[in-house]
Amino acid sequence: DCTRMTLFVPKMLKLAVTLALCVAAVVAQTPPSKPVWPNAFSATVFMQSVNTTIPPRFTRWFYDKTNERERFDGLDFWRGEQLFTTVIRTGGAQGMEYQIIYHQDETICFSQANKSPIYKPDFNLFNYVGYTLIDYTVTNHWVATNRTTNWFFQYYESQKTREPVEYDVLDQHRNEVTYHFYEFDAGAQDSSLFTVAPLIRAVCNPRA
């Protein structure tokens, strides 16, 4: 049989099945074109990590690379409690990050400068591996290594729709963060999503 199947279970307890098809296989696999990361989208994402202090959580991600801004809504830990939190981040020379925490009738805000651009994967650096099953969804599996930082990236897109299914980041210390996409809607995002209400901004506490 020319089809080789490899099963592996990473530390985050995710089951992935990678299928590599040889030239003589009944169904020949043609490498797809490079993935395309849209400039704007909203998505429901489950984040989990290995060897880090980041707790697993669901978040709603609003992304607008064209205008260098993004937003995350979801439960996060603050002072030992899991509370609804909004993070609004803008990039560039005047970039800022706002963390807004809601606790019953209390709203707490922290702000700090963010000079880093909003992240966008450069898929020109990724190489195609083959098919992989993620939650029994057939995906195109892509990998890349940053030779300067020794970070390793894996990207899985739906073989059918080309939408993101999962994105893994492994740093040089073996800390791994996985972003699993349960919903993905490409398209322009309303600018009001990235605006901090004036009343909240007025009481926002700067972080050093």
Image (cartoon, rainbow, N blue to C red):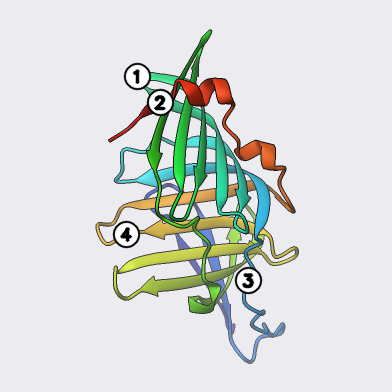
Please name the residue that numbered disc 4 is placed on.
171
First in sequence: mark 1 or mark 4? Answer: 1
Q: Is residue 46 left or right of residue 28?
A: left
How would you rate the neighbour count of disc 1 (Cα within 10 Å): few for under 14, some for 14-19, many for 20 or more? few
x and y, in percent, of residue 201 in the image = 50, 26
Please name the residue that numbered disc 2 is placed on.
77
x and y, in percent, of residue 122 in the image = 52, 71
Q: Are marks 4 and 2 in contact (CB under 8 Å)?
A: no
Q: Are marks 2 and 1 in contact (CB under 8 Å)?
A: yes
First in sequence: mark 3 or mark 4? Answer: 3
Please name the residue that numbered disc 3 is placed on.
35
Mark pair 3, 1: CA separation: 39 Å
Q: Is residue 79 left or right of residue 118?
A: left
What mark, if any, has residue 80 been given in the picture? 1
First in sequence: mark 3 or mark 2? Answer: 3
The amino acid pointed to by label 3 is Pro
Residue at image coords 66%, 61%: 38
